[in-house]
Structures are given as C-alpha cells and as structure tokens.
Image (cartoon, grey):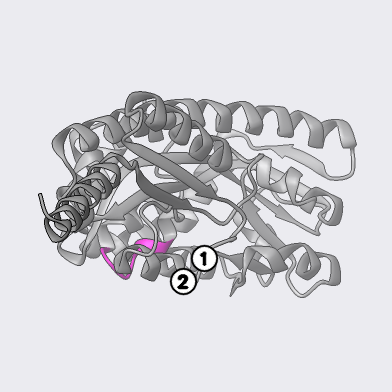
Amino acid sequence: MNLKSKFVFAAVVAALSVGAAYAQQPMVIKFSHVVAEATPKGQAALKFKELAEKLLPGKVTVQVFPSSQLFGDAKEMEAVLLGDVQFIAPSLSKFDRYTKKVQLFDLPFLFDDIEAVDRFQHSAQGKELLDSMVSKGIKGLGYWHNGMKQLSSDKDQLKRPEDVKGLKFRIQASDVLEAQFRALGANPQKMNFSEVYQALQTGVVDGQENTWSNIYSQKFYEVQKTIAKTNHGVIDYMVITNAKWWNGLPADVRKGLAQAMDEATAYGNGVANEFNERDRKRILEAGKAKVQDLSKDDVAAWRKAMAPVWKKFEGEIGSDLIQAALKANK
C-alpha cells in the first residue's frame, strides 16, 4: 500500500469511527418548566428524567431546566413548536388558543374533587383531549396535578356569591375564569403569578383562587383574611411535546418515553395530593387566615351563580365533553 493509499485508508477508518461514536451518543432531551424543583411539577419532571434514562440506558439523556432557566411562560410554547426544547408542562388554561375544548377544565364546580378529575383524565374522552392539538403541532402526553382551587379574599366573610360582589380577583389568562368572576359581580384581573403576593399585600386585588400548596408556598395566606374551602376548580398541567418530533422517534425510544411519562405522572400526582393536604394543615396551624367550610346550601348557591358560565362556553367546549366530565363525579 503506497503512502497515498494509507492516508485514504486512515481517513476512511477515522470517519467510520467518528460515525460509530456519533451513532452511540445518547439523544439529548430537554424538559423546560417554570416552577421550582421542590414543587409537584418539579418533582415529576425529575422523576421522568430518572425513569427515562433507566428505561433507555445509553439512548437518551434528559436535561431538566426548572424555574424558567431556559424559557418563561411567554416563550415556552413557541420553543417546543420550534424544537428548541422537547417537553414543557404549561397550565391547562394556556391552551385555549390551540383548542377550545381544553377550556373544560376551567369550568367552575365541574369536578367534585381531584379523584373525579383523575377519573375523567383517564377516560377515553380525557385521553382524546391529549391529541386535540396534533394538527397545530402539539402532542399531549399526560396530565399533571397541581390541585383543586380554593377562593380567598381580604374580607371576613366568604361563604356566598354575594360576599365577592364588587371585589377584584386575580386570575390566570383565561376567558372562562374571567366570565366566572363577572358572573359573580366581581372584577377579574389577569396577572402573572409572580406578581400576586404584592398585589394582595398592597390591595391592588382583593382576592385570588389557588391550590392549598400554592397559597402556602407563595404565602398568600399571610395577606388574606379568609380562605373558603370551595374546591370550585382545578389547576392542572398538560405535558406536551412537538408532535412531529414525537412521531419521528424510533419506536423503542417512543415506547420507553411514554412509559416513563405514565409512571412519572402517577408519581407527581401523588406528590401534588400530599403537598395540598400538608399545606392545608400548615395554613390552619399558622392561624393567620380564617379557613371557612361551606355547607351544601352554600355550594348550591355558588353553583347557581356560576351556571351562566357553563352555558356561555358549552358550544365551544361541547356538551358531550361536559357530560363525560360530570360522569366522573361519584
């Protein structure tokens, strides 16, 4: 073999070696979310990383970026559609511009408790919603709980709808939630989550709605007089990915990631339930905000006051979907 042939041979061997090494490199999967690692969402994301890497050893590496390290609320949806990140878990209220059907979860007093939410999300209709945005490039992989919402205000009484008339309430950016408070004669104010504590403290808003864990971790109970145990709504997330990217994965990788997501979902939802019960007790023990229980008559009055909201959005959501959700209550 002459010198030139040796160089060519060496180059071919080097190229093949690099190609083989490249082929053996694990696929890097980025999971971006906007909350702290200590939250149920943060814990579920870490569990997904652990399970995915265990089920697909050497094939995938999952990088989790909490607390908006990569993308904040305003940019994360665009990032997943562009392929800059593979997984995100936005609040269900964020999807109304992609499908009106997901507005179902914002309807007040639709679900009796978090177990009913679970039953619906595991039903055929609940699973169908995960695929309701595929035409827009979004594939849903699972629902992650934050928990049931409670209502709070800076007033002493919060038992009946008339107790909130004229008050200002912070809401997530949702047409359904805006209609909910307008039906009560209250004034909804769309506001970023990070701004809520100061807004409550300074009186920019009189009240808010949130889960026990959010009310505790964000110290809302310190700047509110009353928390009504309403369970009037749910704050949940949908874990989503880029539909084209997902469908283009090797079958074994897709299967492994789907299994990891299912197991991480069950784990994270258990954590969310534990956190809410723990933090409800912590709020009671702190004694700074009065927690009011509602009677059946009180709840009936709230349901009646909010009934027009269901009527307003029934056409967009679909009466069949609403009925399916109601069947999840026992």
Amino acid type, residue under disc 2 in the picture = Lys
Q: Circle 2 — which element?
A: loop
Give the left or right position of residue 203, taking residue 162 as reference: right
**Name of the residue lying farthest toward the front:** 2
Of residues 63 and 107, the one nearer the viewer is 63
**Residue 96 counted in the magenta span:** yes
Q: Quadrant of residue 126?
A: top left
**Residue extent of the magenta highlight:** 94-99
Q: Which circle marks residue 252 in the picture? A: none
Give the left or right position of residue 330, taking residue 177 as reference: left
Mark 1, residues whose alpha carbon is within 10 Å: few (<14), some, or many (≥20)?
many
Rendered location of residue 57, percent (x, y)? 35, 27
Of residues 52 and 144, the one nearer the viewer is 52
For residue 234, say whether it is visible: no
Q: Which residue is mark 1?
A: 71
Of residues 230 and 44, the one nearer the viewer is 44
| Quadrant of the frame with the C terminus | top left
Rendered location of residue 108, percent (x, y)? 45, 51
Rendered location of residue 33, percent (x, y)? 52, 54
Give the left or right position of residue 34, taking residue 62 as reference: right
For residue 103, say whether it is visible: yes
Q: Which circle marks residue 75 in the picture? A: 2
